[in-house]
């Protein structure tokens, strides 16, 4: 077998059905052994818990081919832990972390021909998801659950390079204080859909959400954490006073890259909206794009423009992006435990 006959350099960022996926079911208080299957369909009762009360959580990570031809994933242990945290908060049975890693290995090995070649700009996106599967009519947790992990090859998030985007300050709240903002629950993303459709209709790429309690400090966007670069070229990372920011794996990795590779000072603190104009650069960070540069923020008609401008990434964010992607792709030495190799034999 060899690579699938795909124009890897020109695929988009969307779903493409691959050959195999992993499925495990929770019933009678325990997870079964799990299997690799070719069946991509999910059959549920009309009264399934996920359909009634949105009991679901998910993750997202990528597999890459390195210059040496190895297939690797980036810090899957953190995805496994975050899914455990999400499950606990939603009263779902956590899928064991070691089995999560094993499922990643099985899914990627079973779809090795779908891993894009090194240098194509494409990657294999891996989506684990868990949901309540048995009938629930009263408001309570389900008794049975399904854990699935599938994958799809995706092209680069930005075609032709990462051009700075324009974002807006949202009038909506992403999460309630002490709610579910710090877990990767499907319901959080459902809540953001109206806001992002509205932003796109107004010509903006994303929403910047303020803290839900006082609406004076920066939190995150609908699908990514936020980073800033101050006047001295150092990194400032917004922190939530009410713990409603998702702990992005990309953001946590950027913080370590900034400290250990680029020798920048890093400050994680609450960031007031009224001080954002003092920063030189802004970026949105997440699995899909790694870092999306922001050129300006529209705050109800008032523009906050960054010195980095609207033509290209600012110098510090570019260094962060190039260093992190270099680690992911094997061009730079990674910190211990960051790169997980998937052995095909």
Image (spheres, rainbow, N blue to C red):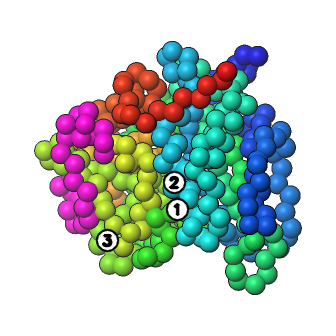
Quadrant holding the C terminus: top right
Is there CB contact under 8 Å for labels 2 and 1? yes
C-alpha gap between disc 2 and disc 1: 6 Å
Q: Quadrant of residue 114?
A: top right
Q: Is residue 87 left or right of residue 303?
A: right
User: Residue under circle 2?
Assistant: 81
Which percent across, then down, holds residue 74? 49, 37
**Residue name at image x 36 percent, y 33 percent:** 335
- The answer to whether residue 163 is seen in the rendering is yes
Residue 85 is marked as 1
Q: Image height check: is 90 above or below 341?
A: below
| Residue 15 visible to an observer of this rendering | no
- Residue drawn at 37 percent across, 48 percent down: 252
Rendered location of residue 265, percent (x, y): 18, 45
Residue at 60% x, 70% y: name it.
Answer: 90
Q: At numbered mark 3, what does the secondary structure look like: helix, strand or loop?
A: loop
**Quadrant that contains the N terminus:** top right
Cα separation between marks 3 and 1: 19 Å
Nearest the viewer among 256 and 81 is 81
Position in image of residue 178 (x %, y %): 43, 76
Q: Looking at the picture, does residue 306 appear above or below residue 327?
A: below
- The label nearer to you, 2 versus 3, is 2
Does the CB distance between marks 2 and 3 fall below 8 Å?
no
- SS for tag 2? helix
Magenta segment, which residues?
255-279
Characterize the local packing of mark 3: few (<14), some (14-19) or many (20 or more) Cα atoms within 10 angstroms: some
Asked whether 45 or 208 is in front, the reply is 45
Q: Which mark is residue 222?
A: none
Kindly indicate whether the residue at mark 1 contacts the one at mark 3 (C-beta within 8 angstroms). Answer: no
């Amino acid at each position: 077998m060899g690579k699938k006959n795909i124009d890897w350099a020109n695929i988009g960022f969307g779903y493409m059905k691959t050959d195999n996926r992993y499925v495990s079911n929770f019933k009678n208080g325990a997870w079964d052994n799990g299997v690799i299957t070719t069946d991509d369909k999910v059959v549920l009762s009309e009264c399934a818990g996920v359909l009634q009360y949105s009991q679901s959580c998910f993750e997202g990570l990528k597999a890459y081919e390195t210059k040496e031809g190895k297939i690797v994933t980036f810090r899957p242990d953190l995805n496994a832990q975050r899914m455990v945290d999400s499950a606990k908060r939603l009263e779902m049975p956590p899928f064991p972390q070691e089995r999560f890693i094993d499922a990643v290995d099985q899914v990627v090995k079973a779809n090795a021909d779908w891993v894009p070649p090194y240098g194509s700009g494409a990657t294999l996106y891996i989506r684990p998801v868990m949901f309540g599967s048995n009938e629930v009519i009263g408001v309570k947790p389900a008794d049975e659950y399904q854990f699935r992990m599938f994958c799809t090859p995706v092209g680069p998030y930005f075609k032709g390079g990462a051009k700075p985007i324009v974002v807006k300050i949202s009038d909506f709240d992403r999460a309630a204080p002490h709610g579910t903002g710090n877990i990767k629950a499907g319901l959080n993303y459902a809540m953001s859909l109206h806001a992002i459709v509205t932003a796109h209709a107004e010509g903006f790429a994303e929403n910047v959400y303020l803290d839900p309690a006082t609406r004076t400090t920066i939190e995150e966007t609908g699908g990514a954490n936020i980073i800033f670069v101050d006047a001295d070229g150092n990194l400032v990372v917004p922190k939530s006073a009410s713990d409603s920011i998702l702990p992005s794996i990309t953001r946590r990795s950027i913080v370590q890259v900034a400290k250990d590779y680029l020798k920048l000072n890093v400050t994680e603190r609450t960031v007031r909206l009224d001080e954002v104009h003092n920063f030189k650069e802004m970026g949105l960070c997440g699995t899909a794009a790694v870092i999306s540069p922001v050129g300006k923020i529209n705050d109800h008609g008032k523009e906050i423009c960054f010195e980095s401008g609207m033509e290209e990434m600012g110098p510090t964010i570019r260094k962060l992006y190039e260093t992190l992607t270099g680690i992911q792709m094997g061009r730079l030495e990674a910190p211990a435990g960051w790169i997980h190799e998937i052995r095909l034999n």
